[in-house]
Image (cartoon, rainbow, N blue to C red):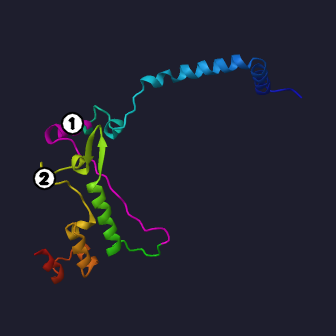
């Protein structure tokens, strides 16, 4: 039965590796080092604008104009809440879950991280639509002015969420 070229090549490689293992390992190591030399000067681009938008495109020019005249665009971070494992409920608009959202929001707003000997908080990183004013934080707790006490005394959370401000109970809270 005639041997194929592939069989002969693999047999030759096996004989070479078996008869001169040090030389094969040395050549493989040198080859690997040469192949990775380019990685020493490699820079990784993680700006999505530069990654996906050609620099000479209309979109890039418009973005540069916008940044120059109005300041750089802010990026939004978001949290998505889901039910705890094993929960049969399918309603996130409940007082206990919204209270957990409020607690998490409070922890995020008050957490400080030390970087280069300086404490960094959300206040240092957030987007401020009005300079020297508060951070722009969008939250379901805004329906209750970020106040857990207002949430606890709300007679109808779902009515508040759908913003039916003509309802007398909702109106009375606005004053």
* Residue 161 coordinates in the image, percent (x, y): 26, 73
Image label count: 2
Q: Residue at x 47, y 22 (%)?
A: 38
| The quadrant where residue 68 appears | top left
- As for residue 69 lying within the magenta part, the answer is yes
Which residue is situated farthest in the right direction here? 1
Between residue 141 and residue 43, name the one nearer to us.
Answer: 141
* Residue 47 falls left or right of residue 175: right
Which structural element holds mark 2? Answer: loop
Can residue 51 be seen? yes
Queried whether the magenta region covers residue 110, the answer comes back as no
Residue 2 versus residue 170 in the image, above or below: above
Residue 162 appears in the picture as rendered: no
Location of mark 2 (residue): 133
Q: Which residues are magenta?
A: 60-86
Q: Which mark is residue 64?
A: 1
Q: Is residue 40 left or right of residue 47?
A: right
151 over 29 or under it: above or below: below
Q: Position of residue 17 (x, y in %)?
A: 75, 22
Alpha carbon distance from label 1 to label 2: 26 Å
- Disc nearer the start of the sequence (1/2): 1
Question: Is residue 51 or residue 123 the one in the foreground?
Answer: 123
Label 1 secondary element = helix
Foreground mark, 1 or 2, reads 2
Q: Quadrant of the N terminus?
A: top right
């Amino acid at each position: 039965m005639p041997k194929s070229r592939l069989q002969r090549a693999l047999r030759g490689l096996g004989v070479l590796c078996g008869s001169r293992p040090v030389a094969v390992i040395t050549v493989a190591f040198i080859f690997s080092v040469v192949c990775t030399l380019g990685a020493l000067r490699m820079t990784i681009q993680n700006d999505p604008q530069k990654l996906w938008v050609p620099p000479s495109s209309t979109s890039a020019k418009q973005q540069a104009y916008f940044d120059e005249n109005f300041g750089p665009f802010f990026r939004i971070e978001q949290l998505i809440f889901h039910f705890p494992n094993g929960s049969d409920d399918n309603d996130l608009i409940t007082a206990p879950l919204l209270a957990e959202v409020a607690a998490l929001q409070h922890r995020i707003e008050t957490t400080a991280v030390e970087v280069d000997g300086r404490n960094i908080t959300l206040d240092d990183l957030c987007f401020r639509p009005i300079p020297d004013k508060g951070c722009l934080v969008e939250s379901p707790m805004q329906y209750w002015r970020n106040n857990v006490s207002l949430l606890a005394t709300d007679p109808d959370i779902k009515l508040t969420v759908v913003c039916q401000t003509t309802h007398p109970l909702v109106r009375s809270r606005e004053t």
